[in-house]
Structures are given as structure tokens and as C-alpha cells.
Image: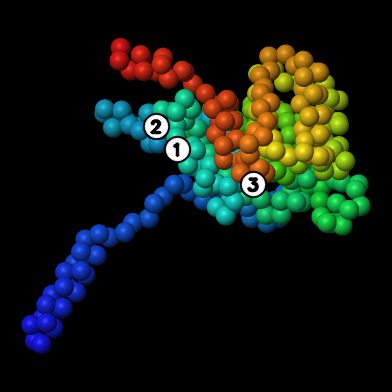
Amino acid sequence: MRKTILYTALACIALLVSELQAQSKPIVIGQSYSLESEIFEQPHEINVYLPASYSEKDKSGKLLNKSYPVIYLIDGGIEQDFIHMAGLASLAADYRNIREFILVGVQTVNRRYELTSPTKVAEEIKYVPKNGGSQKFMSFLDNEVKPLVQKRFRTTDESMLIGESIAGMFTAETFLKRPELFTSYAVISPSLWWNKQQIAKSALSNLKKHNYEGKKLYLTIADEGGDMREGVEIFANAIKESKLKDFEWKYEPMEHKTHATIFHPAALEAIHFLMAIKPFEQYQQEQHQ
């Protein structure tokens, strides 16, 4: 009996020592900031993922001070889409034909207000009584979020806005009404049925008002039909009809995806299109020279 107790005690001590030796530590993928917005009079969470090479130093130990393009993710809170998008951003460190970039996740607090244009449709007003804050959110990005990012981090002049569903509609509206805010846009399954497709139907006139030289757009939709698909088609046809100069875009529906499953694969396709670098074969050749 005494031997059994002794052996049990020794086993417990060995287990405790093993656990102490295998101390856990947190996995850090970024930094989170609370931005006290004067425009919205409430804080918004801003989450930032920095590329692997951001803190690289040369042989003498001096910081390389490289600058990076920025992707602004709408619905970018920790409980929203930031974490899985940070996973896509990390692929750039392992050559995947993606340039490294800074990912900035911008939280939406009341997305049905912040990301929608005003609607005149009675049923939509009943469902979303507080709507129409999209212009305010554009100003929030322009006057509060972007200055914070540019002040704290080493950024280039290249920036991309990405959003899906209602956030996709907001991204499309920003592209049409304030294209100067970003150099490229990724619009994924946008809710262009809103307000009787008014954003899509006004696309052609808005496209004629602005300069799109040097801009890029990636547009896609899942297996959705009805007013949503029709709105996206109106939007795409307006771009075709506009024949914008020095403008690069791709419209690539994903019929094998649903509204619930499109964001992750579509975001990767958008990043490949908008943040692509040299072909892999050329990259390999340069590494062996």
C-alpha cells in the first residue's frame, strides 16, 4: 500500500514537472486599437496584421524600413472577419504569388446603418429603421482610420478596400462615389438589391463623374439569383459600357459557392488579382541566379 502511494505521488510530481516544462504562451497575430471616433461618437476596434518582414533587419542589425501596401477590411473586428483574413495575409510570407501587405480590419458596430445608403423602400425601412450611414462611414475611413494607419505604420500609396455582402455593397458604393479613397477594390457578393438596386442603377452616371486611371476592381458573386444577381449584372455592365481608361478589372462569378461560403475563397482570388507579384517560375529562376 505504501509503495502504491509513493509511486502515485512520484507520478503526480513527474506530471507536474512535465506540465511546467511545457509552459503555454499566447499566439499573437496582430495588434488591436480602440479608435475613439468623433464622427460616430463611439469607439471602433481597429485590428492590424503586419507582414512577417515588417521587423526585418540587415546584417548590421539596422531595421530595413520597408513600406507596404494596405488592405482595409470592412467588418474587420475580431469577432467578424479579421482572423481568417490575417491567415490569408500570412500566405505572402510563404511564396504564393502575393505581395506582402498590412491588413487593417475595421470593425463595424452597427453595420446595417454604417454600410447602407438611405433607402426609400418601406419594407427595408421597417426591417432596418436606422439606415443610410454609408457616406458617414466613408468619411470615417478617410478622416480617422487611414490617418491613424499612415501615422503608425510604414505604408505605400497603394491601398485596397474589401467587403462582402452588405460590406460588399458599401465597397461598391465607395468605388462609385469616392474612388480616390483607395487604389483598388474587392467587391464580393454585394447586396445590390438594396433600395431597388439604386447603387447599381446609378453606376453608369457615377462612373462618368470620376477618374479611374490606375484603379483596379475585383467583382464576384456566389450562386445567388434574383434582385441581387441582377444588381451585380447591372453594375458590371455599367463598367463595361464606361470603357474606363487605364483601368483593370475582373468579374468572375463563383457559381459553386453560396453566400455563406464565398468570402474566404473569393478574398484569396481578389488578393491574387490585386496584389499579385512575379510568376512563380520567374521567382524560382531569380532565387537560383
Task: Using the image as rendered, state which of residue 117 and residue 287 is in the foreground.
Answer: 287
Q: Residue furthest bottom?
A: 1
Q: Residues within 10 Å of mark 3 (few under 14, many from 20)?
A: few
Disc number placed over residue 193 in the picture, else none? none
Question: What's the amino acid at mark 3?
Answer: Ala
Label located before the other in sequence (1 or 3): 1
Instruction: Specify whether residue 276 is in view.
Output: yes
Q: Amino acid at mark 2?
A: Asp
Element assignment for label 2:
loop
Task: Indicate which disc residue 260 carries.
Answer: 3
Position of residue 83 relative to residue 20, above or below, is: above
Q: Nearer the viewer, mark 1 or mark 3?
A: 3
| Percent coordinates x, y for residue 71 in the rendering | 57, 35
SS category of the residue bearing label 1? helix
Structural crowding at the residue carrying mark 1, measured as other residues with C-alpha within 10 Å and reported as few (<14), some (14–19) or many (≥20): many
Circle 2 or circle 3, nearest the eye: 3
Image quadrant containing the N terminus: bottom left
The answer to whether residue 148 is visible is: no
The residue labelled by disc 1 is 90
Separation (CA) of disc 1 from disc 2: 8 Å
In percent of width and height, residue 217 lies at 67, 26
Residue located at (11% from left, 77% from top) = 7
**244 left or right of 285 in image:** right
- Image coordinates for residue 219, horizontal then vertical, percent: 68, 30
Q: Work out whether residue 183 or residue 89 is closer to the camera in this orientation and state it.
A: 89
Residue at the disc numbered 2:
94
